[in-house]
RNA sequence: AGAUCCGUAGCUCAGCCUGGUUAGAGCACUACACUGAUAAUGUAGGGGUCAGCAGUUCAAAUCUGCUCGGGUCUACCA
């Protein structure tokens, strides 16, 4: 190795990115980083597949930075980290995109366009932005294997999904059932929650709402209280059309209800009603309570009422009531035809009941509400669906038969059936209040018509069967932040329902279940296919058994594409010889991604061993919005299939908001284009900003100003430190060829920065291990800025350019080099380009590593022997003292170039005195002072002040604390000294007062000093500095000389001289300064590399300079 | 509606777990200084009801409860 360290004009991060990217490409640096770790323990990472039919955004950059840095870090730590990429290719967004592009709707599929063509189109567009994704992946420096990604639409992938499903089926976890889903009668289709969350679907509408009165049966009435007259349960609904399907009334078990005697406002008949006590005021006027019942008649506006009795909800359980609206279609016989042992028309209990609105009693129609369905099933109410899929009443619902429950057909003559139901209730003394009610209700995003909740057949995974195990295993997962695991995710698990897999779509993974038609007894046979081979076998078998045209297109080669429409063309045969058709559903795309640990390897058909080595993952990371998405489905399938977690650590990162804190959305136009950002600031600054600005799980307010700051402050400073190093190392030819000088043989300042460096390694390693990259990054920043650049380099500057190339200088070079080299490695996970660039700049000269990339090196290890905490502390002391002295100089307007004679620093104890003595040279140099006088503990020169230590005393003293603090503050030197030596009783008169003695020891006080008469003093905490500001004649002269040197140095620099150029200097004679310059001539010449310094009466060509208010003309001539 | 995260200087964030008496840093602004590495740095200045209320405590930014505001996820129901 040889040559020079490359020096640069200025820092250009984007071009560094480009240069390094090209190098990586050429040298296969990524592939090599994995190959180099062959045989090392694996660290397993799963890539959550993005969907390539949308453009990547800046929020993708943050989660991928996080993933990338962990993988890079682990690689450097000696693990082999394979990162298989993946693409999520199925799902509704793809379908919607295609429909928009082709200008069609779902209804057109099968008529205007065949399913085959439609799916072909989906397959084409799904990778539309793959190029853009690949580009951002590279540009941001995300190392992931894009050459062999898993793709969810490929046959092999789907085959594994089928295998998973068939395993679940075998375990009895896959079943068909009814669930209540949003359904659009106008469009004739179920809607997903995604569709329901389209903008504008929830609208404020006015509906006819009814408070209906359900008459309590005579038998049950007695259970409440013995009283005269009819009693009713009041329940409210905004959808009166569901009332004929009513099968139960739900009350909250802990809600208080009362029985109220009053009159029906419409029929004026005397009634008794039950409702929640908290809602009485909604229906009754306070002034009418216990009003005049005797004289009530139809003309009286204010209806009298009184509470007869009250009870809590659980006491109402199982009360029976008469059916509200009996028809032919909803008789008890009809109900039991569907649910043989149903027990409807009862009061049941439900936790979801509130007293926010309504009556505190919930009308329950199991077919038309998810809660209703759940509670109905639990209480065996049965189910009635008196409305068909077109949204109209079926036959047998009296005068309402065949009427649409909402105006789905835009019929101008439509009469609202809800109003008619309300009228009927009024006439029958079954309505207490009918009114228009404005509420927020979901609408179908395509037809703009209100949706209804409707029971649809669907296939489910019985996740509830393994709920306890999922909860248990979740506790072993390391969640970052932990609260997401216990809170959002843990809570979600606790309230888990079975996983509804079914989707009525076209482009997705088909459910591999074939079934026969139901026979007369409602029985049927079904088969769940678990592999292509099995399907092909069944295809042949069916053809043989059923004969004719059965599966004729699939007999030769078997099935070639596992999507619709092909799978639907296949008929299988049941064990008893009946034809079976596939159920038409596709599965939830979340199943696709949740099964990626298996499907990415085409397990169990191939790669069995690979799979075993790569399950479960050590680490995954995605946005927090995936908590109930990917994180959930991974976990569910891991537990269901293998009784295992799917990942050991999961980091969920927060959202990226714009700088005003708004969510980024195309609609608002505040989306940050990651390409623009990375092109203008470079990937490193962007990554560094994203990681260090806020913890990954906090939402990040993205502001390019922040990136600029990172670029300037962190990368700029580090770059300059390198430039400084390169400048002088090139002059001296330092290439680390000398033996490594033992740290304890180096000057104290070197020992200090190396101690800090090792402390930094410790800190960074700890935080990376804890998945706290923000803390790690900030620690690196702190080191570069505060320690390395602005203290070490600042103080050592002269060591690099003064003197011969021997011990001290080599120490300085080796030390600074080691710092830079180590920093490269520490920062490499977060800023991979810059780190590699810097590493190569250093290493190509020194050749200390055989590696071509920092990413192939090992992460630095801590050298505990070099860490000297006391040294770090006293250096901090030196910095604090210097800073105090500088503030004093500022206060009295004495610039640093003016030397001063002396500073006094009182030490509070011997160890502090010792520390200051050890760093006094640094203080002297930094603040340009000749002597540092450390005043010992016993001096009388200063006045001491004591402050109570609240931490130790507070516990002992309690309420006397304030008094004691006052006492302590007023102690004099003698008392403080006594406390320090042996302790003092603060309340000597304690015996007389009958108190406990309060003994103060040295640890109970903090001693400070406050006054040194005749000196300029500054105090900061326990530190006091007293500066002697008298300037003697000699000091003044030296100050002049230094000022002069500074001016000449500036001239050298401005004139573009090289560092080593020698010069001749001529100066105009000047009465005020001449004596100073002559006295310090040797010093001056040495500093400015002058061979001569000559005074002339007049200088014709030269620069006018000003030195301590004196004007001079100077000419500087380069020699040779 | 439920869960969760967040709320500290004009802005970005520390500090909170483990309570301790002047609440810190950076950016931005102003002035001065330092510099033969520096787009850096130092010193000084202005800038805070630590979202609000209540509680626990000798002592609360810190612990507890409630409220308000913002984000996200889930749900949207009589």
Image (spheres, coloured by chain):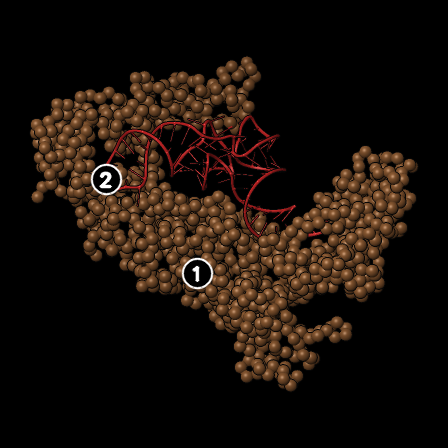
Chain colours: A brown, B red
Element type at marker 1? helix
The answer to whether mark 2 and mark 1 are in CB contact below 8 A is no
Q: Nearer the viewer, residue A224 or A553?
A: A553
The disc at residue A797 is 2
How many C-alpha atoms fall within 10 Å of the one at disc 2: few (<14), some, or many (≥20)? some
Answer with the quarter of the image where residue A629 lies. bottom right
A163 above or below A886? below
A566 above or below A645? below
Provide the residue designation for mark 1.
A133
Q: Nearer the viewer, residue A662 or A831?
A: A662
Q: Earlier in the sequence, mark 2 or mark 1?
A: 1
Q: Position of residue B57 (x, y in %)?
A: 57, 28
- Residue sitting at x 91%, y 44%: A228
- Residue sitting at x 42%, y 54%: A674
How many C-alpha atoms fall within 10 Å of the one at disc 1: few (<14), some, or many (≥20)? many
Element type at marker 2? helix
The disc at residue A259 is none
Q: Chain of mark 1?
A: A
- Left or right, residue A1042 beside residue A428: left
Q: Mark 2 to mark 1: distance in Å? A: 46 Å
- Left or right, residue A1021 beside residue A1035: right
- Residue sitting at x 84%, y 63%: A328
Q: Position of residue A131 (x, y in %)?
A: 42, 63
Q: Nearer the viewer, mark 2 or mark 1?
A: 1
């Amino acid at each position: 190795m040889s040559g020079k360290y490359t020096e640069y004009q200025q820092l250009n991060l984007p071009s560094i990115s480009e240069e390094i990217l090209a190098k990586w490409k050429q040298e296969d640096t990524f592939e090599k980083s994995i190959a180099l770790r062959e045989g090392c323990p694996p660290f397993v990472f799963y890539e959550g597949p993005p969907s390539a039919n949308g453009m990547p955004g800046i929020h993708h950059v943050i989660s991928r930075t996080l993933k990338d840095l962990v993988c890079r870090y682990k690689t450097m730590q000696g693990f082999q980290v394979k990162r298989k990429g993946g693409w999520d290719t199925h799902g509704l967004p793809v379908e919607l995109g295609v429909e928009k592009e082709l200008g069609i709707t779902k209804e057109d599929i099968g008529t205007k366009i065949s399913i085959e063509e439609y799916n072909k189109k989906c397959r084409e567009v799904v990778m539309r932005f793959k190029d853009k994704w690949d580009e951002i992946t590279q540009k941001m420096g995300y190392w992931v294997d894009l050459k062999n990604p898993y793709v969810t639409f490929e046959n092999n992938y789907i085959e594994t999904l089928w295998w998973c499903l068939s395993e679940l089926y075998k375990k009895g976890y896959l079943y068909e059932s009814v669930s209540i889903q949003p359904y659009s009668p106008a469009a004739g289709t179920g809607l997903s929650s995604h569709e329901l969350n389209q903008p504008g679907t929830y609208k404020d509408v006015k509906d006819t709402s009814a408070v209906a009165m359900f008459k309590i049966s005579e038998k049950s009435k007695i259970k409440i209280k013995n009283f005269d007259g009819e009693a009713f349960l009041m329940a409210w609904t905004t959808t009166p059309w569901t009332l004929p399907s009513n099968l139960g009334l739900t009350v909250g078990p802990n809600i208080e209800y009362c029985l109220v005697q009053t009159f029906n406002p419409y029929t004026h008949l005397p009634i008794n009603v039950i409702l929640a006590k908290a809602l009485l005021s909604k229906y009754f006027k306070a002034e009418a309570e216990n009003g005049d019942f005797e004289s009530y008649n139809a003309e009286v506006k204010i209806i009298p009422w009184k509470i007869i009795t009250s009870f809590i909800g659980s006491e109402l359980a199982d009360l029976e009531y008469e059916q509200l609206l009996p028809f032919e279609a909803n008789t008890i016989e009809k109900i039991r035809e569907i649910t043989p042992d149903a027990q409807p028309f009862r009061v049941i209990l439900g936790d979801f009941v509130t007293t926010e609105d309504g009556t505190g009693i919930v009308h329950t129609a199991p077919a038309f509400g998810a809660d209703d369905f759940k509670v109905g099933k639990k209480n065996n109410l049965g189910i009635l669906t008196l409305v068909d899929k077109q949204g109209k009443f079926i036959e047998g619902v009296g005068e309402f038969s065949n009427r649409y429950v909402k105006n789905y057909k835009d019929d101008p003559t439509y009469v609202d059936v809800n109003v008619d139901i309300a009228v009927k209730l009024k006439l029958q003394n079954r309505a207490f209040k009918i009114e228009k009610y404005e509420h927020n209700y979901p609408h179908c995003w395509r037809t703009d018509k209100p949706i209804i909740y409707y029971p649809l057949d669907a296939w489910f995974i019985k996740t509830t069967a393994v709920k306890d195990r999922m909860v248990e295993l979740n506790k072993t997962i390391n969640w970052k932040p932990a609260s997401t695991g216990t809170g959002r995710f843990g809570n979600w698990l606790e309230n888990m329902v079975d996983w509804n897999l079914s989707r009525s779509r076209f482009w997705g993974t088909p459910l591999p279940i074939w079934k026969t038609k139901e026979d007369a007894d409602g029985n049927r046979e079904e088969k769940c296919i678990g592999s292509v081979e099995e399907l092909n076998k069944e295809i042949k078998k069916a053809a043989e058994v059923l004969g004719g045209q059965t599966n004729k297109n699939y007999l030769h080669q078997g099935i070639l594409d596992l999507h619709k429409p092909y799978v639907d063309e296949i008929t299988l045969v049941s064990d008893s010889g009946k034809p079976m058709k596939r159920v038409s559903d596709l599965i939830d795309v979340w199943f696709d991604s949740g099964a990626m640990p298996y499907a990415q390897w085409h397990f169990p058909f191939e790669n069995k061993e690979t799979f075993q080595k790569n399950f479960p993952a050590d680490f995954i990371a995605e946005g927090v919005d995936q908590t109930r998405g990917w994180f959930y489905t991974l976990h569910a399938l891991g537990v269901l299939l293998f009784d295992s977690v799917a990942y050991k650590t999961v980091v969920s990162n927060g959202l990226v908001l714009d700088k005003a804190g708004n969510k980024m959305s195309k609609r608002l136009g505040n989306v940050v284009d990651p390409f623009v950002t990375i092109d203008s600031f470079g990937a490193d600054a962007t990554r560094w900003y994203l990681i260090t600005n806020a913890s990954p799980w906090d939402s990040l307010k993205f502001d390019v100003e922040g990136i600029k700051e990172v670029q300037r402050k962190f990368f700029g400073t580090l770059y300059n430190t390198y430039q400084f190093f390169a400048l002088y190392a090139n002059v001296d030819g330092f290439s680390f060829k000398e033996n490594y000088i033992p740290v304890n043989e180096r000057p104290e300042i070197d020992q200090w920065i190396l101690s800090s460096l090792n402390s930094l390694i410790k800190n960074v390693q700890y935080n990376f291990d804890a998945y706290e990259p923000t803390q790690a990054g900030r620690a690196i920043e702190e080191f570069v800025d505060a320690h390395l650049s602005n203290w070490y380099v600042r103080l050592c500057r002269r060591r690099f350019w003064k003197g011969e190339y021997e011990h001290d200088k080599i120490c300085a070079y080796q030390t600074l080099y080691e710092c830079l080299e180590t920093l490269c490695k520490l920062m490499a996970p977060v800023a991979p380009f810059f780190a590699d660039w810097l590493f190569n700049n250093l290493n190509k000269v020194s050749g200390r590593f055989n590696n071509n990339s920092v990413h192939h090196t090992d992460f630095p290890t801590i050298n505990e022997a070099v860490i000297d905490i006391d040294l770090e502390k006293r250096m901090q002391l030196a910095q604090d003292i210097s800073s105090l002295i500088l503030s004093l100089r500022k206060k009295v307007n004495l610039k640093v170039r003016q030397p001063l004679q002396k500073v006094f620093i009182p030490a509070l104890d011997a160890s502090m005195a010792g520390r200051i003595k050890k760093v006094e040279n640094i203080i002297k140099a930094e603040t340009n002072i000749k002597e540092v006088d450390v005043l010992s503990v016993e001096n009388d020169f200063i006045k001491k002040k004591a402050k109570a230590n609240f931490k130790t005393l507070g516990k002992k003293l309690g309420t006397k604390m304030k008094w004691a603090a006052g006492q302590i503050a007023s102690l004099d030197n003698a008392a403080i000294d006594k406390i320090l030596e042996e302790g003092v009783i603060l309340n000597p008169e304690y015996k007389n007062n009958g108190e406990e003695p309060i003994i103060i020891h040295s640890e109970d006080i903090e001693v400070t000093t406050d006054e040194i008469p005749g000196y300029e003093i500054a105090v900061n905490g326990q530190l006091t500095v007293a500066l002697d500001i008298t300037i003697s004649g000699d000091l003044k002269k030296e100050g002049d000389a230094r000022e002069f040197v500074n001016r000449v140095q500036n001239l050298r620099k401005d004139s573009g001289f090289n560092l080593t150029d020698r010069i001749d200097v001529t100066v105009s004679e000047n009465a005020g300064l001449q004596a100073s310059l002559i006295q310090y001539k040797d010093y001056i010449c040495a500093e400015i590399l002058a061979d001569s310094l000559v005074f002339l009466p007049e200088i014709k060509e030269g620069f006018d300079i000003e030195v301590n208010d004196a004007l001079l003309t100077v000419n500087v001539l380069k020699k040779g």
